[in-house]
Amino acid sequence: MTRIPLALALLIALASPAAAHKLKVFATVAGAEVTGYAFFVGGGRAQGTGWIARDAAGTTVAAGKTDAEGRYRFTPPAGAGDLTVTVNTEEGHIAQAVLPAARLDGTPAASGSAGPAAGASLAAAGVVTAAPAAAPRDDVALAALVEAAVQRQVEPLQEQIETMDARLRLTDVMSGIFLIIGLAGIGLFLRGRRG
């Protein structure tokens, strides 16, 4: 009699999690393009799978199929707002990634400066000023380079976070099993007290 519950508990404990085929979508902004890929938790990329990008109003801005590495790429229209990239394997796996408009508009605001007119008026007044040092790079270009470098470093970390977040851990399974066993024990105890 006790062999059946024990065998059932052992079978449940050794079962692999059902989340092994859960589809996830990763999306990021690289320059003026949105790039990303679709992958299954537990390994593997969604190859040749249809994807569609929609703006906040639900209008399709881009669509296509993922490549051999599960990647997609498109250039969003200016002022599209928030974008939602949806990947559908048509086998029951659908996933989305949302890119807020703030990430799509990565151009920093131009910093204010006195400009050449102010320098000319100072020179006319007899004030000697040092020649301005040449800017090492354009602020917008420098910001784009920094963002691209940071994105290359952060992308693998974001993927790991997505994978770890969706993974069913052994401790979660064991907690569920012991909860069921505990509730069954309480039920048997109460049933024994009635009789």
Image (cartoon, helix red, strand yellow):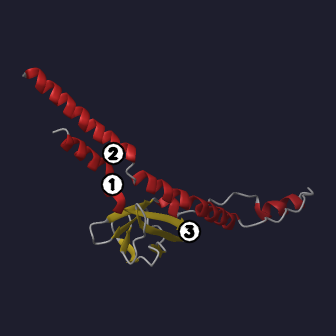
Q: Callout 1, which amino acid? A: Pro
Look at the numbered disc 1 and give the secondary structure of its residue: loop
* Quarter of the figure with the N terminus: top left
Which dot, 2 or 3, sits closer to the camera? 2
Sequence order check: which comes first, mark 2 or mark 1? 1
- Residue 34 image position (x, y, % from top left): 49, 69
On residue 30, the disc is 3
Residue at image point 42% right, 76% down: 66
Look at the numbered disc 2 and give the secondary structure of its residue: helix
For the residues labelled 2 and 1, say whether their Cβ atoms are less than 8 Å apart.
Answer: yes
On residue 173, the disc is 2
Q: Nearer the viewer, residue 21 or 173?
A: 173
- Drawn side of residue 144 relative to residue 37, left or right: right
Task: Name the quadrant containing residue 80.
Answer: bottom left
Sequence order check: which comes first, mark 1 or mark 3? 1
- Residue 134 image position (x, y, % from top left): 82, 66
- Residue 109 image position (x, y, % from top left): 62, 59
For the residues labelled 2 and 3, say whether their Cβ atoms are less than 8 Å apart.
Answer: no
On residue 17, the disc is 1
Gap between marks 2 and 1 measured at Cα: 8 Å
Gap between marks 2 and 3 measured at Cα: 39 Å
Which dot, 1 or 3, sits closer to the camera? 1
Sequence order check: which comes first, mark 2 or mark 3? 3
Q: Callout 3, which amino acid? A: Ala
- Residue 180 image position (x, y, % from top left): 24, 38
Residue at image point 47% right, 72% down: 76
* Quarter of the figure with the C terminus: top left
Look at the numbered disc 3 and give the secondary structure of its residue: strand
- Crowd tier of the residue under label 2, counting other residues whose Cα lies within 10 Å: few below 14, some 14–19, many 20 or above: some
Q: Nearer the viewer, residue 193 or 34?
A: 193
- Crowd tier of the residue under label 1, counting other residues whose Cα lies within 10 Å: few below 14, some 14–19, many 20 or above: some
